[in-house]
Image (tube, rainbow, N blue to C red):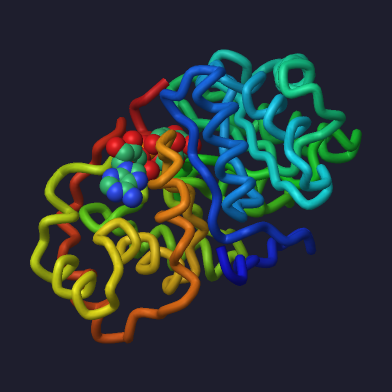
Amino acid sequence: MADTLFVKLNDGHTMPQLGLGVWKASVEEARAASLAAINAGYRSIDTATIYGNEEGIGQAVRDSSVPREQLFITTKLWNDAHLEPRKALETSLRKLKLDAVDLYLIHWPAPRKGDYVKAWRGLIELRKAGLTRSIGVSNFHQVHLKRLIDETGVTPVLNQIELHPMLQQRELHAWGTQHSIQTESWSPLAQGGQGVFEQPVIRGLARKYGKTPAQIVIRWHLDQGLVVIPKSVTPARIVENAQVFDFRLEKDELAEIGLLDIGKRLGPDPEIFS
Ligand code: NAD
């Protein structure tokens, strides 16, 4: 992978713009995929408590020849632990066998439970304690983000949200940018299906640039300044998904992909999910 790009977060730290997602991978699959990714040049891996595979990520970090400080590990606080984030992160760190993660996220706001501001105060303490370098959120809408900022004065570095050509989240992305919150795309490939790869505009651009449809979609995320974490446990695809740093899409091509937005969610609605 040539020239991994980095983004600067609002707390001064940097983060690779491309990472590996490992949702639905077993411990062993996650270990093997993470190691394959690191060998292919990835420096960032996105896991979560609820994925049940943190042990595999930790093993890959230990097995790889890349120094720990060059790797960026994200994990997430599950919805049942908003009131005890310290215990949750300590459990994750034990599984990862790491002293600290690079980024800890509140996985969902679960607004019906009403505890996400308390969880955020907990994450602020965890950062102070050095158990995570940066803190952020996932699946937060403007209203949830605004509450965190207004009530604690601490702005998340990043919001990881469902974002792909069929659900482009332009308003939330723009709002985040205005408030120095980096947007990160989950399910960036629309989970590999849903017809995105067959869209004529994607196929046409794949032909033009000599790239695969997946690479065009990943480049579309990068060219909009999004952090992107495509998932694969297949070594050839892991390599393919990282071969995206030798071309750029033109403005009008980004706009054409923009027309594929139909507001289609593949995951739950954050307002009601708990
Ligand atoms: P994705 O959009 O990354 O799609 C992954 C699927 O696409 C793979 O399983 C495979 O079937 C296919 N694929 C991958 N590379 C391909 C290629 N080169 N060509 C053709 N098909 C290819 O889906 P995802 O796993 O849902 O999302 C990515 C990551 O985002 C997850 O693994 C996880 O880390 C994160 N995530 C976070 C949340 C959250 O609530 N914060 C929710 C879902 C996912």
Q: Quadrant of ligand 1?
A: top left
- Location of the C terminus by quadrant is top left
Residue 145 visible in the snapshot: no
Q: Is residue 93 above or below residue 68?
A: above
- Location of the N terminus by quadrant is bottom right
The foreground one among 198 and 163 is: 198
| Place of residue 24 in the rendered image (x, y in percent of width and height, measured from the top left) | 41, 24
| Place of residue 67 in the rendered image (x, y in percent of width and height, measured from the top left) | 83, 46
Q: Is residue 151 above or below residue 48?
A: below
Q: Is residue 206 above or below residue 96?
A: below
Residue 252 horizontal side relative to residue 55, left or right? left
Q: Is residue 154 above or below residue 177?
A: above
| Place of residue 119 in the rendered image (x, y in percent of width and height, measured from the top left) | 66, 28
Residue name at image x 16 percent, y 63 percent: 260
The foreground one among 113 and 32 is: 32
Residue name at image x 48 percent, y 48 percent: 229
